[in-house]
């Protein structure tokens, strides 16, 4: 991951206020509350709002990000919530996760650079056990239109970093689809996700 990309996220997470708030993403909350706890991985977990929520439900949580500032905030939030999470900083291939290690993986607004996003998805898939659950929410390619109308909704301006249903089908081909849809949603998440946007939501069980 290049330095300007890392610096951008460190700068965003260095403020006292939580960039995306302290509450979990609503789709993640809805899906996790249907499951019994196990071991879960949160890629690009930022300031930890989603990982900390999962830990509060009894999940054993592993999180990672490229931002050291994000980790500081996440551990601060975990301590305030009286839970623990294993939070690692670095690029995915350096972090030491194992094949079929996790019962669930939650990709919540994990917009990786376009050149690596499918490769990251394939690697993450290898870390999920057969029968495990993948929960995904991120901005769709149509979100660019929403961002043009309202910058406060946030999200990447590079269409190649956004998602389509066909991309999700290709990256996670060997899954029983529980839900896969493009939806217009209203977000109220901290400073940087506010307003109406277009997202892809996917929940699948690995075959």
Image (tube, grey):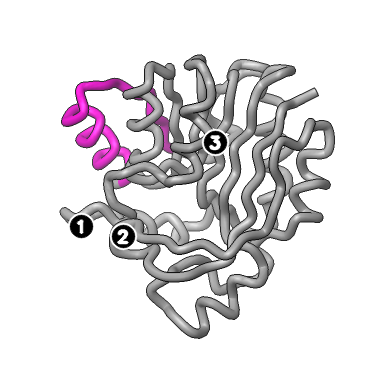
Residue 174, x across and y down, in percent = 83, 32
Residue 150, x across and y down, in percent = 44, 80
Instruction: Classify 147 as above or below 191.
Output: below
Q: Give the left or right position of residue 169, taking residue 20 as reference.
A: right
Q: Residues within 10 Å of mark 2 (few under 14, many from 20)?
A: some
Region in magenta: 70-89
Q: Which residue is mark 3?
A: 106
- Estimate the spatial distance between the alpha carbons at disc 1 and disc 3, rounded to whole Å: 25 Å
Q: Residues within 10 Å of mark 3 (few under 14, many from 20)?
A: many
Q: Which residue is mark 2?
A: 12
Q: What kind of element bears circle 1?
A: loop
Q: Earlier in the sequence, mark 3 or mark 2?
A: 2
Q: What kind of element bears circle 3?
A: strand
Q: Residue at image x 80%, y 23%?
A: 207
Residue 184, x across and y down, in percent = 57, 65
Q: Earlier in the sequence, mark 1 or mark 3?
A: 1
Q: What kind of element bears circle 2?
A: helix
Q: Residue at image x 69%, y 42%?
A: 179
Contact, CB < 8 Å: mark 1 with mark 3? no
- Estimate the spatial distance between the alpha carbons at disc 3 and disc 2, rounded to whole Å: 22 Å
91 is within the stretch colored magenta? no
Q: Quadrant of residue 134?
A: top right
Q: Which residue is mark 1?
A: 15
Q: Residues within 10 Å of mark 1 (few under 14, many from 20)?
A: few
Report the number of numbered marks: 3
Q: Quadrant of residue 173?
A: top right
Q: For this rendering, which residue is in front, 63 or 170? A: 170
């Amino acid at each position: 991951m290049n330095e300007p990309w890392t610096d951008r996220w460190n700068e965003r997470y260095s403020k006292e206020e939580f960039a995306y708030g302290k509450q979990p993403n609503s789709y993640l909350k809805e899906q996790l509350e249907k499951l019994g706890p196990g071991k879960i991985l949160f890629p690009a977990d930022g300031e930890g709002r989603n990982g900390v929520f999962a830990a509060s439900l009894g999940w054993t949580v592993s999180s990672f990000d490229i931002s050291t500032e994000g980790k500081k905030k996440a551990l601060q939030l975990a301590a305030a919530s009286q839970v623990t999470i294993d939070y690692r900083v670095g690029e995915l291939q350096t972090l030491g996760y194992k094949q079929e290690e996790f019962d669930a993986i939650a990709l919540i607004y994990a917009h990786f650079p376009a050149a690596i996003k499918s490769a990251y998805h394939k690697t993450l898939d290898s870390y999920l056990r057969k029968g495990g659950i993948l929960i995904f929410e991120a901005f769709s390619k149509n979100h660019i239109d929403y961002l043009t109308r309202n910058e406060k909704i946030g999200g990447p301006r590079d269409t190649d970093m956004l998602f389509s249903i066909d991309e999700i089908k290709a990256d996670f081909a060997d899954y029983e689809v529980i839900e896969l849809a493009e939806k217009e949603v209203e977000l109220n998440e901290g400073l940087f996700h506010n307003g109406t946007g277009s997202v892809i939501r996917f929940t699948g069980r690995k075959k």
